[in-house]
Amino acid sequence: MSNTTELLQHGAELFPGEVVTTAHVRHLDLPLQAGKLALITLDNGFDHTKPTTFGPGSLLKLSAALDQVEAEAAEGKIVGAAITGKPFIFAVGADLKGVELLQQHADALAIGKGGHEVFKRIAALPVPTFAFYNGAAMGGGVEVGLHCDYRTVSAGVPAFSLPEVFLGLVPGWGGCTILPNLIGAGKAVKVIIENSMNQNKQLKGKDVFELGIADAIFEPADFLEQSLLWAAKVLKGDLAVEREAIDRGKAWDDAVLWGRMVADSKVHGAAPAAYKALDIIAAVKDADLADKASLQAGFDAEDAALADLIMSGELRSGIYAFNLVQRRAKRPVGAPDKSLARPVSKVGVVGAGLMASQLALLFARRLEVPVVLTDIDQERVDKGVGYVHAEIDKLLGKGRIGQDKANRLKGLVTGSLDKAAAFGDADFVIEAVFEEMGVKQTVFADLENVVSPTCVLATNTSSLSVTEMASKLKHPERVVGFHFFNPVAILPLLEIVRGEQTDDASLATAFAVSKKLKKTSVLCKDAPAFVVNRILTRFMGEIQNIIDEGTPIASVEKAVEPLGLPMSPIVLLELVGPAIALHVSETLHGAFPERFTVSENLGKVVKAGKRGFYTWVDGKQVLDPEVLELLTFGDSVLTEEQVLSRALEAVAQEIGLMLAEGVVAEAQDIDLCMITGAGWPFHLGGITPYLDREGISERVNGKKFLAPGVASVPAQA
């Protein structure tokens, strides 16, 4: 029994619940009389709803298949070997459920080494090897293909990535070592660091080919047939595969430096995964794909980094966050039975400003039903419709949709000043007008006179009471909160708010629409500012109080850097807009005056018409001297540690109160909202486990938010 087999058998004992991926070997006669090919197909026995993964049991199956292929190659029975996946899925990497179970550093190291040893066997086969990326490929799924000599990709591949850094790992089965030596350090850093840290951005099949990861691209309809023909030409010598030369000089060093800048901008050194990946990329600068032995130092470094990170709190946090986004988000807690949802064949949007226009575009693209915008005059309506049509033209220009689709979408989006004509046959109408209760109540009163009895009335309010908004209607049960986050097309979260009288049918329809919009829905109680804005306003309010009391802005900004937030509080204030931030803080101050303050300094900034505290001078962001002239400060100066502690204690208190009030079902819903609506970093694993780990939850509330074992660090870490 080989050492690799022993490692993986021990690993399989640690992963008793693994869904094992089998590796089926079949033999195909290649076109052009090129000879016989051994084709290994990865398949876990499920349809595409359960993607293929690699755990130790799966690696053992692949190793056994390679035993057979290796023997056949040695006997001259085959001229090449290839690996592909089941329909729609190539393979999506390591089995994260199993990784969570590892408690010993030695076991984590063994898993890394075991994967390397199996994948290296592909590269060591005495015949040319091919990877046919037929479907989604991530992590170890990408890496198994990197160990092959040649790769093809389907143009229909929807998702291709190395997401490990996003989760708190490194691409540890060859990604950090082979990819930069295949496509160059610059492109590899984009895939491993930049894409991963930008909310796990996925590549499409076309991107994979253009980056040089795949040597050929074919349409999905006959992908396997074309890949086999292409392989036959390569094996016969009729087709030479040419790749760009790798610049191993300054360009390599610059790429690593750029990666560090990206990592700094995202996590400010607070999470180690990206930096470990970059260290490995820097170290394999002089490796050579033609000399497999020269790659071993990189593989060893990957093993060490992988083991260290598996034992870290960052990975546990990343997996916890990943599970929220991939699983809990697909089964919203508290949503009514979906059978109660009414069909939606037409959507109305009240308002034609930027937010309303973004909503109209999203509804048209995802639901593909008529969408009508209204506003107070024709100029506003025309501007809103024009915005939507211009955005569709941009999609066409980028090749994301075809001309027929563009024409169809444009035809779906129209405008009208006649609400009765526009909304009389609508099934779902959403308002996106000025954030003032009286205005919204008037809008709904007007709508109730023209819409059908079953039409759902939705509000995109960010902080106002849905119950109060519906209180003057004859049928308040049809009103539901439908709070999007800006930019609408990018941020996944949709807070769905149940008013006191909202009925199950209206709520079920809202959830059904959200699903078609491909949004992450969380059911919220009708409470001031719901979830994200309430937490952010408490956090930002405490930060603003600390500044007003006398701690310099620069010190406050630096104090929160260890959180690795996507942007600093003051920059976030500018993005949100001081006027909106002031309005939300006033709303929450009215509801909870003992905890939410209204900053006089913020009021001065809004009154002066300023966008924020910063301005740009000679290409650099600096504090705006005109703003500083407006402000008054106290003389209480806190240390950076005191700033961070005070801000987080305020957040912990607010979350505790929200859970006690039943704003959401569980702490996990708070985390899901903050990750998908506020960009709370994956490496922190949600705000509540972070507050638990830091001891803040117990210090403030006397208990942790999460039960023992949830998002926890291994005992041996």
Image: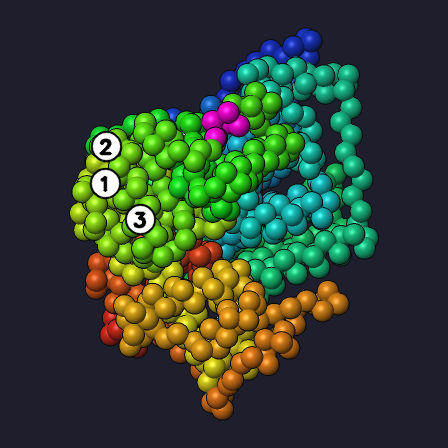
The residue that mark 3 highlights is 442
657 versus 299 height, above or below: below
User: Quick one: quadrant of the C terminus?
Assistant: bottom left
**Range drawn in magenta:** 409-414
Indicate the quadrant where residue 272 lies.
bottom right
The answer to whether residue 88 of the structure is visible from this angle is: yes
Nearer-N-terminus badge (3/1): 3
Callout 1, which amino acid?
A: Arg
The residue that mark 2 highlights is 454
Q: Residue, x 47% and y 73% (percent of image)?
A: 603
- For residue 478, which numbered disc appears in the image? 1
User: Any magenta on residue 454?
Assistant: no
SS at mark 2?
loop
Image marks 1 and 2: residues in contact by CB distance under 8 Å: yes
Q: Nearer the viewer, residue 686 or 624?
A: 624
Q: CA distance from mark 2 to mark 3?
A: 20 Å
- For residue 80, which numbered disc appears in the image? none
Q: Residue, x 21% and y 58% (percent of image)?
A: 662
Colour setup of the view: rainbow
Callout 2, which amino acid?
A: Thr
SS at mark 1?
helix
Left or right of 161: which side holds 662?
left
Percent coordinates x, y for residue 102 in the rendering = 39, 54
Image marks 3 and 1: residues in contact by CB distance under 8 Å: no
Percent coordinates x, y for residue 35 in the rendering = 65, 13
Residue extending farthest to the bottom is 635
What's the magenta bit mostly, secondary-structure-wise? helix
Q: CA distance from mark 3 to mark 1?
A: 16 Å
